[in-house]
Image (spheres, rainbow, N blue to C red):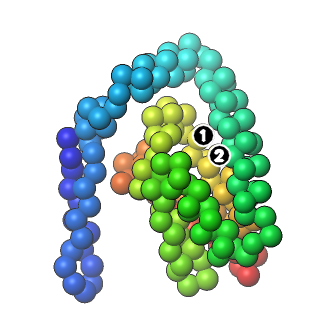
């Protein structure tokens, strides 16, 4: 139910990262989330996935307004820091790091994992949301739905500045 990955570094001891396997994720899911997944799978099989996409778009419009209000009139470094806290408060377990002139937003948990595994558009919508509210270029380099143990976003000032 748990997998282990060893990350070797140039200096020092390796880091061990532990993740739930798909079987483990199912084991720790509650019956509500299993039923929700069955519903989403049914909606997709019936050719009604556009309803879920519309829901996600509406959800991101609401998040945009909420985030924009809290990030308005801040510099990029402050915006990224606040965004990380907002994401953690909603279950994403986010961490922010500064890397040169860029920032890295890492999310160790994905509350929308099950939806994104059926509707990959959810990941693209998150990246677009971050780009709009941060007024920055955002690249999504790792996704949990693509077998990564985290979601990783690289955030850069627009126009390289």
The C terminus - image quarter: bottom right
Residue occupying the point 66% across, 23% down: 51
Packing grade of label 1 (10 A; few <14, some 14-19, many >=20) is some
Checking the image for residue 22, the label placed there is none
Q: In this figure, what is the number of numbered marks?
A: 2
* Picture layout, residue 113 above or below residue 14: above
In x, y percent, where is residue 72?
78, 64
Quick one: 108 or 21, which is closer to the camera? 108
Q: Residue at x 51, y 69 (%)?
A: 96
Q: Image point 62% across, 54% down: which residue? A: 127
Q: Which mark is residue 125?
A: 2
Which image quarter holds the N terminus?
Answer: top left
Which quadrant of the view contains residue 60? top right
Measured from the top left, where is residue 156 in percent x and y? 65, 73
Q: Which mark is residue 121?
A: 1
Residue 124 place in picture, x, y as percent:
61, 47
* Mark 1 touches mark 2? (CB < 8 Å): yes
Residue 30's place in the image compared with 156, above or below, is above
Q: Nearer the viewer, residue 56 or 143?
A: 56
Judge from the rendering whether residue 64 lies leftward or rightward of residue 38; answer left or right: right
Judge by depth and name the residue closer to the eye, 135 or 84.
Answer: 84
Label 1 – label 2 distance at C-alpha: 6 Å
- Asked if one can make out residue 9 in the rendered structure from this viewpoint, the answer is yes
């Amino acid at each position: 139910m748990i997998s282990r990955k060893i990350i070797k570094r140039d200096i020092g001891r390796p880091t061990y990262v532990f993740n739930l396997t798909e079987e483990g994720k199912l084991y720790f899911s509650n019956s509500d989330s299993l039923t929700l997944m069955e519903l989403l799978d049914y909606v997709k099989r019936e050719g009604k996935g556009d309803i879920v996409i519309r829901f996600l778009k509406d959800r991101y419009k609401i998040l945009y307004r909420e985030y924009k209000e809290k990030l308005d009139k801040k510099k990029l470094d402050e915006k990224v820091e606040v965004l990380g806290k907002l994401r953690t408060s909603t279950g994403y377990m986010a961490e922010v790091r500064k890397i040169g002139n860029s920032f890295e937003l890492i999310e160790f948990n994905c509350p929308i994992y099950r939806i994104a595994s059926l509707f990959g558009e959810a990941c693209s919508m998150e990246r677009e949301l971050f780009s709009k509210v941060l007024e920055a270029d955002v690249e999504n380099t790792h996704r949990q739905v693509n077998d990564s143990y985290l979601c990783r976003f690289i955030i850069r000032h627009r126009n390289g500045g």
